[in-house]
Image (spheres, rainbow, N blue to C red):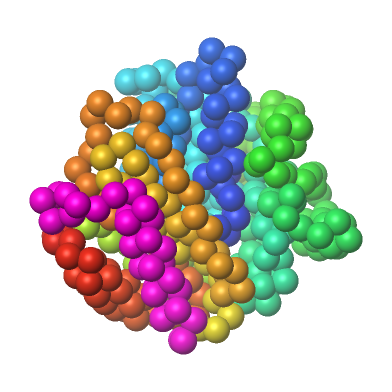
């Protein structure tokens, strides 16, 4: 069994990358299990991943490197017992320290032999200036733990800028291997897979980790006191929510109508966040699921327009109840205010379109 941990700040492309990685291994006949750690109470990324037929287990309501270590162990053991996958991919929330997650996995004494892939952290090349401006210390700590740093979204980064981004990442972590990543480019994914296939000296690393634990009692302690969680250190305000939609209230609406509604709702949320935090970065994700269709919108910075995607379900027979899921995690806005913005926008936009809804 191989375990792969993928980290990186909110909106850096982790979910897309793991879908590409998981699909590749599946194409080779290997079974793939994916654990998704969401920052909020509502799991969202698992909906997209499951559309590709990959087995997913979500851990919500916190950060698995800080407060959910027990849940992570329980989830790993449950996945191993039920599915015994050849590959397990753990996607950390964008406000986690992926190195701590990897270390905790290694200290779990899992009851089987496994290879730990090099710790992969994505660094969004399209937003590197905003990231280093808004959350330099937090992002630097994420990158400093990596063994491989993939400068993601390389296909939309200017060719003259890409070497600058790679040099900045290398300066933060001189020991890491720096590669570029475009999830749309099969050659780029192949290079990434090649890096992940390199085995690490687990025994030597585990010995080092045990020394750390022996010295201070826990990887999450400093000077005898609990460290602040990565969520607090990131300075990100967040809110996640899910609504169930009453199907009888929108029988006359078609896919173009749902696309318009999803776009309008995302535009409203983004605009209200901009009023408070004009230079925000983070990730706002909106999934509107109607029958076998999934309407997806996301935005990761104040400077970009929302990105829209339509994903037809791989399983049209057992379509879920119509629902709307939103995760907003952004800098410069307190969590209660993020909650107010999202809830008000949902109420206004859905009501304007005659759609009845209930909190899930």
Q: What kind of secondary structure does the magenta stretch mostly adopt?
A: helix
Could you tell me if residue 156 is visible in this image?
yes
Q: Residue at x 43, y 71 (%)?
A: 267
In this view, which residue lies farthest toward the left?
Answer: 248
Q: Is residue 269 magenta?
A: yes
Q: Is residue 278 magenta?
A: no
Q: Is residue 108 left or right of residue 7?
A: left
Residue 229's place in the image compared with 174, above or below, is below
**Residue placed farthest to the bottom in the image?**
275
Give the residues drawn in magenta, as a range.
247-276
The residue lying toward the viewer, choosing from 125 and 313, is 313
Residue pictured at 40% horizontal, 37% vertical: 312
State the residue at coordinates (36%, 68%): 265
Measured from the top left, where is residue 136 in percent x and y? 67, 72
Count of marks overlaid on the render: 0
Where residue 342 sits in the image (x, y, percent)? 32, 72
């Amino acid at each position: 069994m191989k375990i792969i941990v993928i980290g990186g700040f909110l909106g850096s492309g982790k979910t897309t990358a793991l879908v590409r990685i998981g699909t590749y291994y599946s194409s080779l006949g290997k079974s793939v299990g994916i654990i998704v750690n969401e920052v909020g109470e509502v799991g969202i990324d698992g909906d997209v991943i499951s559309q590709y037929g990959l087995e997913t287990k979500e851990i919500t309501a916190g950060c698995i490197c800080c407060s959910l270590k027990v849940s992570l162990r329980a989830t790993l053991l449950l996945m191993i017992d039920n599915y015994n996958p050849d590959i397990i991919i753990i996607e950390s929330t964008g406000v986690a320290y992926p190195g701590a997650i990897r270390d905790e996995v290694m200290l779990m004494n899992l009851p089987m032999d496994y290879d730990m892939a090099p710790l992969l952290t994505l660094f969004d090349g399209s937003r590197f200036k905003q990231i280093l401006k808004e959350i330099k210390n937090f992002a630097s700590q994420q990158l400093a733990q990596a063994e491989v740093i993939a400068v993601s979204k390389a296909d939309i980064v200017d060719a003259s800028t890409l070497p600058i981004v790679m040099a900045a990442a290398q300066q933060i972590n001189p020991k890491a291997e720096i590669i570029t990543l475009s999830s749309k480019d099969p050659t780029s994914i192949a290079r990434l897979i090649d890096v992940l296939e390199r085995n690490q000296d687990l025994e030597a690393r585990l010995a080092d980790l045990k020394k750390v634990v022996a010295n201070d009692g826990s990887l999450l302690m400093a000077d005898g006191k609990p460290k602040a969680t990565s969520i607090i250190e990131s300075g990100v305000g967040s809110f996640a929510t899910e609504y169930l939609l009453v199907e009888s209230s929108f029988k006359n609406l078609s896919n173009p109508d749902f696309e318009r509604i999803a776009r309008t709702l995302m535009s409203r949320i983004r605009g209200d966040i901009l009023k408070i935090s004009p230079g925000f970065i983070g990730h706002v994700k909106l999934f509107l699921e109607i029958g076998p269709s999934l309407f997806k919108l996301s935005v990761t910075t104040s400077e970009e327009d929302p990105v829209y995607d339509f994903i037809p379900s791989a399983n049209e027979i057992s379509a879920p109840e119509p629902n709307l899921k939103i995760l907003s995690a952004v800098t410069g806005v307190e969590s209660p205010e993020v909650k107010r913005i999202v809830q008000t926008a949902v109420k206004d936009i859905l009501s304007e379109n005659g759609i009845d809804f209930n909190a899930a």
